[in-house]
Image (cartoon, rainbow, N blue to C red):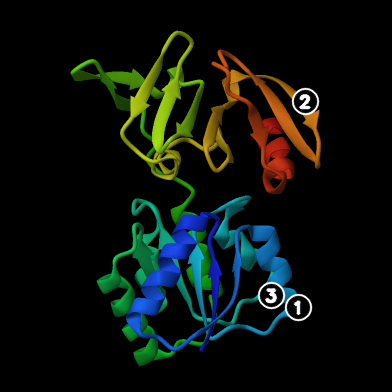
Amino acid sequence: MNLLIIEDEPRAARQLENLLNESGLNYNLLDIIDSVEDTISWFKINKNPDLVFMDIQLADGLSFEVFQHIEVESPIIFTTAFDQYAIQAFKVNSVDYLLKPIQQEDLDTALAKFNKTNLSNGIQPGILKQLLDSMQEPQYRSGILVKEGSGFIQINISEILYVYSESSITFGVTHNKRFIIDETIDLLFSSLNHSQFYKINRGQIVSKSSIEKVNSHFNHRVKLSITNPRDQAFIVSRQKTRDFKQWLNS
C-alpha cells in the first residue's frame, strides 16, 4: 500500500510512522509534505496514493485549500490537534479523523475502517463545503489562564503581543510581562482569532497589533520588528512569507 503523509510537524510525522509500523501495516511511504503549496505540486506530478494522512493546519494554511485547486481521488484520514471545528463534518461521507496526540488504538480503528470501506471517491464538493463552512465561525477564546507564582491569573487575549516556545515551554508576552502558558503552540493557535494572530514559524505566534515593521531577510524571508521583543528574533518562514503579507494586508 502506497501512503502519503501531509504534516508540517516533523515530530508528529515521526510519531505517525512509528504507529503505522506498530500497526503491522505493510506500506510504502511515498513522501512527507509540510505545506499546501507543496501538496498541490506533488499531486500534479504523481499518481494518487492508496491512502493519505493529512493534517489540518499546515505550514502555509489549512489543508482544505488543497481541494480548491486540485482533485484528490485518494481516501483521506485527517489528523488534527483540536476538535472544535470540523469533527462532525469528517464523519459525513465516512471521512475519518485522528485527534492528536494520535493513539495506537485510534489509528488501528481508522485503518480497519479504511480496509472495510476502501474509499476511493476522493473528497466530494459537498463534504468540502461542509469542511470549509465548519472553519468559518469558530468560537475564539477571549482570555487565557496563566501561571503566576503558586497560582493562576486570567490574561485577556487582546493583551498578548506574541507567543513563543522555548525548551518545550510555551511563553506569552504582553507589554509589561512574560508568563507561562500550559498549552502547546499548536493547541493555543487553534483557539485564537487567525485574523489577529499569525503563526509565523513552528515556534512563534505574533499578534497583528505587535508588528511595528516588516524587514526583508535573506532567502526570501522577512524579519519582524515587534513590540517588547525580549531578545527574540521574529523571522517568518519561507513557506509562509507570501501568505503572511496577505494576512497583514487584510
Q: CA distance from mark 3 to mark 2?
A: 34 Å
The amino acid at mark 3 is Phe
Q: Secondary structure at mark 1?
A: helix
Q: Quadrant of residue 46?
A: bottom right
Residue 82 coordinates in the image, percent (x, y): 37, 51
- Mark found first going from the N terminus, 2 or 1: 1
Q: Secondary structure at mark 3?
A: helix
**Residue most extreme to the left:** 150
Residue 146: assigned label: none
The spot of residue 85 in percent (x, y) is: 39, 53
CA separation in Å, label 3 and label 1: 5 Å
Name which residue type carries label 1: Ile
Could you classify mark 1 by the number of other residues whose Cα lies within 10 Å: few (under 14), some (14-19), or many (20 or more)? Answer: few
Residue that lies at the very extreme toward the top in this rendered image: 176
- The residue type indicated by label 2 comes to Asn
Report whether residue 98 is seen.
yes
Of residues 50 and 247, which is closer to you in this image?
50
Residue that badge 1 annotates: 45
User: Which residue is labeled 2 in the image?
Assistant: 215
Q: Is residue 163 placed above or below 159 in the rendered structure?
A: below
Q: Mark 3 or mark 2, which has the lower sequence index?
A: 3
Looking at the rendered structure, which numbered label has been put on residue 43?
A: 3
Between 157 and 186, which is closer to the camera in this rendering?
186
Quadrant position of the C terminus in the picture: top right
10 up-or-down from 201: above or below: below
**Quadrant in the picture for residue 249:** top right
Marks 2/1: CA–CA distance: 35 Å
